[in-house]
Image (cartoon, rainbow, N blue to C red):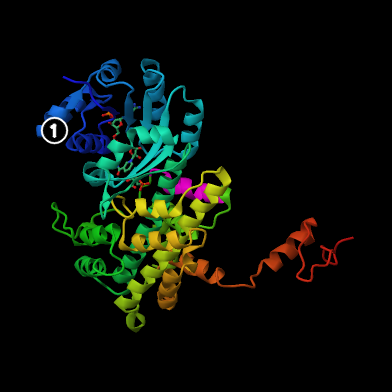
């Protein structure tokens, strides 16, 4: 058999689906998995694609099965597993052989691995879950452009396409691809959280059953909110538990898991001094969701937060409009954070390319991303709030966001991400803020000084000696 064009390590959810996708696009691939029985099972169930897949039982056999110069994708959990695999693999490789970490690595790790690499190394973000990996993910490449170009024919072939354009692009040097993927996931957290908050209003404030919630999301998915996340939220709400016959949402524990990418985004935003309150609120909400005992104790002591909204219910149209507004504000924050990182790390990240890459295949794909790509192409240095198209959208919807957040507050329904979006919006349209007080306080206790509107040089208050 001729040698494979690429190799892949890690036949879990993502790796197995990616390997089949690669084979289906006509590329011969060699695969290896830590647990050999998984490799055998994978190959046995690959159907006619098995002919393009070489299963191997040792790393040496994997390397031997790939044509030189080799390219090998790692699809293993982020962190130590990646370092272990690189350490085991590199001594077996030639100087031009390329290792590609396609998991959700922390971009600081990718920076380090790039610096320490004794051979070519790429860190790429892959989004789309199992379905995307199998039939077309969005791919955010990072590392040396020349190394990306070597594997671009395979990665663009297997990626999702938007109007025929591949959603696989090189983002920048070092960890740029994994950084952009982390921000993608941060936006994903906020988008999911805002949808969940609207679900909370429908359920607790308006008494909607899951199937009514499902109808609402299904309808919205035909309008401006058309997106993968709204679509699957409708499907989740419509699902029935096979064991009990109850709506699935009634049997799922209300504690959200997280593997870390959203948290990394929030941490990095603080380092960059980039304001991303919707994303931060979504991370906090996941953390709070897991404190089930504390929440139950709070409900016992203070009474349940949510109360029915009665006549004060917002219309479904107002809820839809509030979600549109919150979503725009959250994406505006994410893109601003990417712009801040680009400047800080000297990456020259191209915001329109990033928006175009996210239009299909990834978890946050949506009709709105197409408009964002257009708006960013017109003025990539502007906050999306100030791009004409989105300025008008926000002008049309911010009153609804306010109405919904106020209704939630009045009826004990926590809306951390939508509320953070509203506060961000209000702060962003307040030319005269309140930080004069902060500066006065800082000067009072620490003689930190302040700037004056009149430009005079005396920069301390009367308390200064
Ligand atoms: N699931 C998703 O929706 C997405 C996941 N990702 C990222 O992709 C990567 C893989 O995720 P996923 O496929 O879901 O994970 P899975 O848990 O499904 O699979 C993990 C794979 O890694 C292997 N593995 C685990 N630990 C080691 C190790 N120490 N050394 C070598 N191999 C190891 C496992 O082998 P074995 O069979 O021996 O256990 C298995 O093949 C992660 O970084 C994840 O964050 C990215 C986008 C979406
Ligand atoms: O990268 C992904 C989607 O884009 C993965 O599904 C990731 O696991 C999602 O993050 P979390 O597990 O923290 O919810």
Can residue 286 be seen by looking at this rendering?
no
Residue range of the region highlighted in magenta in the rendering: 259-270
Residue visible at 20% across and 28% down in the picture:
28
Question: Where is residue 134 drawn, in percent x and y?
Answer: 22, 42
- Secondary structure, mark 1, is helix
Q: Nearer the viewer, residue 377 or 271?
A: 377
Question: Where is residue 327 drawn, in percent x and y?
Answer: 39, 64
Q: Nearer the viewer, residue 338 or 325?
A: 338
Which quarter of the rendering shows the N terminus? top left
260 drawn magenta: yes
Which quarter of the rendering shows the C terminus? bottom right
- Look at the picture and state if 401 lies above or below 140: below
Q: Which residue is mark 1?
A: 49
- Look at the picture and state if 2 lies above or below 296: above
Q: Residue furthest right?
A: 465
440 drawn magenta: no
Specify whether 221 is left or right of 182.
left
Disc tally is 1
Specify whether 134 is left or right of 337.
left
Q: Nearer the viewer, residue 394 or 388?
A: 388
Question: Where is residue 454 drawn, in percent x and y?
Answer: 79, 71
Can residue 71 be seen by looking at this rendering?
yes
- Look at the picture and state if 427 lies above or below 79: below
Q: Nearer the viewer, residue 247 or 39?
A: 39
The kind of secondary structure the magenta stretch mainly shows is helix
Question: Where is residue 122 drawn, in percent x and y?
Answer: 41, 33
């Amino acid at each position: 058999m001729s040698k494979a064009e690429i190799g892949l390590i890690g036949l879990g959810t993502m790796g197995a689906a990616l390997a089949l996708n690669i084979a289906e696009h006509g590329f011969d691939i060699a695969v290896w998995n830590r647990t050999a029985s998984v490799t055998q099972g994978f190959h046995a169930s690959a159907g006619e694609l098995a002919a393009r897949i070489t299963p191997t039982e040792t790393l040496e056999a994997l390397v031997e099965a790939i044509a030189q110069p080799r390219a090998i994708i790692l699809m293993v959990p982020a962190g130590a597993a990646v370092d272990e695999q690189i350490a085991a693999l590199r001594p077996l490789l030639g100087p031009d052989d390329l290792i590609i970490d396609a998991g959700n690595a922390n971009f600081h790790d990718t920076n380090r691995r790039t610096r320490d690499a004794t051979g070519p190394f790429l860190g790429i973000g892959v989004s789309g879950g199992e379905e995307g990996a199998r039939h077309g993910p969005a791919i955010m490449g990072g590392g040396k452009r020349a190394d990306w170009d070597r594997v671009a024919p395979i990665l663009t072939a297997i990626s999702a396409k938007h109007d025929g354009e591949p959603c696989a692009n090189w983002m920048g040097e070092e960890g740029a691809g994994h950084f952009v993927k982390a921000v993608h996931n941060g936006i994903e957290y906020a988008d999911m959280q805002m949808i969940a908050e609207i679900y909370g209003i429908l359920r607790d404030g308006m008494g909607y059953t899951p199937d009514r919630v499902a109808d609402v999301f299904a309808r919205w998915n035909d309008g401006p909110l058309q997106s993968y996340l709204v679509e699957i939220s409708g499907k989740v709400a419509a699902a029935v538990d096979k064991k009990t016959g109850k709506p699935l949402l009634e049997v799922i524990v209300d504690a959200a898991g997280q593997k870390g990418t959203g948290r990394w985004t929030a941490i990095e935003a603080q380092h960059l001094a980039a304001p991303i309150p919707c994303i931060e609120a979504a991370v906090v909400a996941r953390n709070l969701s897991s404190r089930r005992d504390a929440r139950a104790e709070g409900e016992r002591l203070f009474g349940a937060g949510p109360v029915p909204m009665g006549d004060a219910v917002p219309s479904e149209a107002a809820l839809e409009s509030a979600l549109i507004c919150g979503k725009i504000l959250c994406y505006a924050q994410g893109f601003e954070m990417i712009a801040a990182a680009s400047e800080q790390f000297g990456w020259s990240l191209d915001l329109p390319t990033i928006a175009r890459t996210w239009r299909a295949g990834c978890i946050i794909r949506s009709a709105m991303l197409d408009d964002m790509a257009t708006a960013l192409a017109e003025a990539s240095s502007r906050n999306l709030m100030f791009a004409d198209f989105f300025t008008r959208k926000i002008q049309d919807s911010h009153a609804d966001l306010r109405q919904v957040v106020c209704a939630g507050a009045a009826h004990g329904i926590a809306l951390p991400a939508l509320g953070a979006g509203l506060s961000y919006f209000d702060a962003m349209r307040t030319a005269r803020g309140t930080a004069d007080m902060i500066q006065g306080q800082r000067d009072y206790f620490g003689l930190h000084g302040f700037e004056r509107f009149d430009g005079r040089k005396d920069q301390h208050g009367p308390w200064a000696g």
